[in-house]
Amino acid sequence: MGFCHLALPGPLCPTLPGGAELSTDYAERTRVAAFREGATLIGTLSAISLPFAVGTAGENNADGLKAVAVLVAVLLPLTGLMAFVFVPEPVNRSTREFGLMQSLVFMSKNRPFLRLIAAFLLNGFANAIPATLFLYFVSERLGAAEWRGPFLLLYFACAVLGVPLAVKAARRWSKHKAWSGAMLVTCSIFAVSGFLGDGDLVAFGAICVCTGLLLGFDLVLPPSMQADVIDNDTAVSGSQRSGMYFAAWALATKLSLATAVGVTFPMLSLIGFDPAQDRSSPDALKGLSLLYAWAPIVPKLAAIGLMWGFPIDRVAQRELIGRT
């Protein structure tokens, strides 16, 4: 579905290097990522629903925004203090130190990393296309502008439930196979939205439920695998550079979103879709559906092709740790 861009810090929401350093265990890293992304989703749901739960005050919904501000002011220092007290300092496994240019050379030779970040970029680009067009699709194609908020809330609520599913799937089949399978199922389900039209709210709600569950795989598994490809670099170079790798990860996140926006809006213009019009032409609405539902499938399939035979599984990762 790709709504991650609308309310979270990115398409597969960038993570911190601490997630790679808190544990060297293949499965434990997935659980760390799951707790982090689950908390992010719960926070997103809270931010979406709280303003409505406390009621509104005028057109600007001032009471709701004040409630969000108070919640952040209370929880941010409290949770920050909890992290400081309870999260242990990671062990630095470096035996050598390198400058920036040498580090970049080692990164460029880390083939599992290049393969993973390419798949991440393609999948992020695919997710960002429907995220960019979501408001237009629901308002214009489905004719249900008032349902944009409820659909978004439903999607993220299901994503929370999808997080433990991703953990279980990764434990059974390995991370890259679980992620590839989730992307493939997402393509199959989401393609159906290209056939929807005015009033097809139940069908679109079902799509939100299914793809929301699968969002948990997009959020949890790539960051966990990112920790594993850092092990590959550490084993070869003797230097642990988690921060640099996650900086590249965050850059890919922003690049995928920016690219999708840069491609999507010119395409809307080419198909003749103009949101300023009272009612778009049938051809323009059909083009909107094709762009929203089917354009993301090609980059997702390319990402699946990159990840299906990914070389770092549980056994390979354990060997890498043994070499550091």
Image: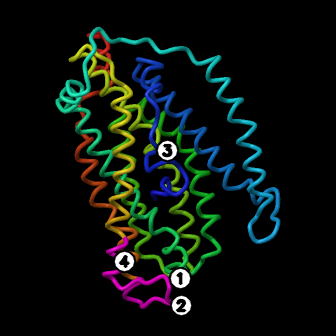
Marker disc for residue 268 = 4
Query: Could you tell me the amino acid type at mark 4?
Result: Leu
Nearest to viewer (mark 2 / mark 1): 2
On screen, 154 above or below 28?
below
- In the figure, is residue 105 to the left or right of 77? left
313, above or below 156, in the image = above
Asked which secondary structure carries label 2, the reply is loop
**Residue ID for mark 3:** 216
Q: Which residues are magenta?
A: 265-285
Which is more foreground, mark 2 or mark 3?
Answer: 2
Closer to the observer: label 3 or label 4? 4
The percent position of residue 14, horizontal first and vertical second, equals 44, 41
Give the residue type at disc 3.
Gly
Which residue is tagged 1? 198
Looking at the rendered structure, the secondary structure element under dot 4 is helix
Give the mark nearer the N terminus: 2 vs 1: 1
Q: Position of residue 211 (x, y in %)?
A: 48, 55
Magenta span includes 182: no
SS type, badge 1: loop
What is the distance, in whole Å, between disc 4 and disc 1 at their CAs? 19 Å
**How many other residues sit within 10 Å of disc 2, few (<14), some (14-19) or many (≥20)?**
few
- Assess whether mark 3 and mark 1 are in contact (beta carbons under 8 angstroms): no
- The residue at which mark 2 appears reads as 278
- Label 3: element kind: helix
Question: Crowding near pointer 4: few (<14 within 10 Å), some, many (20+)?
Answer: some
Upstream in sequence: badge 2 or badge 4:
4
The amino acid type of the residue labelled 1 equals Asp
Going from N to C along the chain, the mark reached first, 1 or 3, is: 1
Towards the viewer: 72 or 220: 72
Q: Which sits earlier in the primary sequence, circle 2 or circle 3?
A: 3
Q: Which of the 4 image quadrants contains residue 301?
A: bottom left
Instruction: Work out which quarter of the rendered image holds the C terminus and state it.
Output: top left
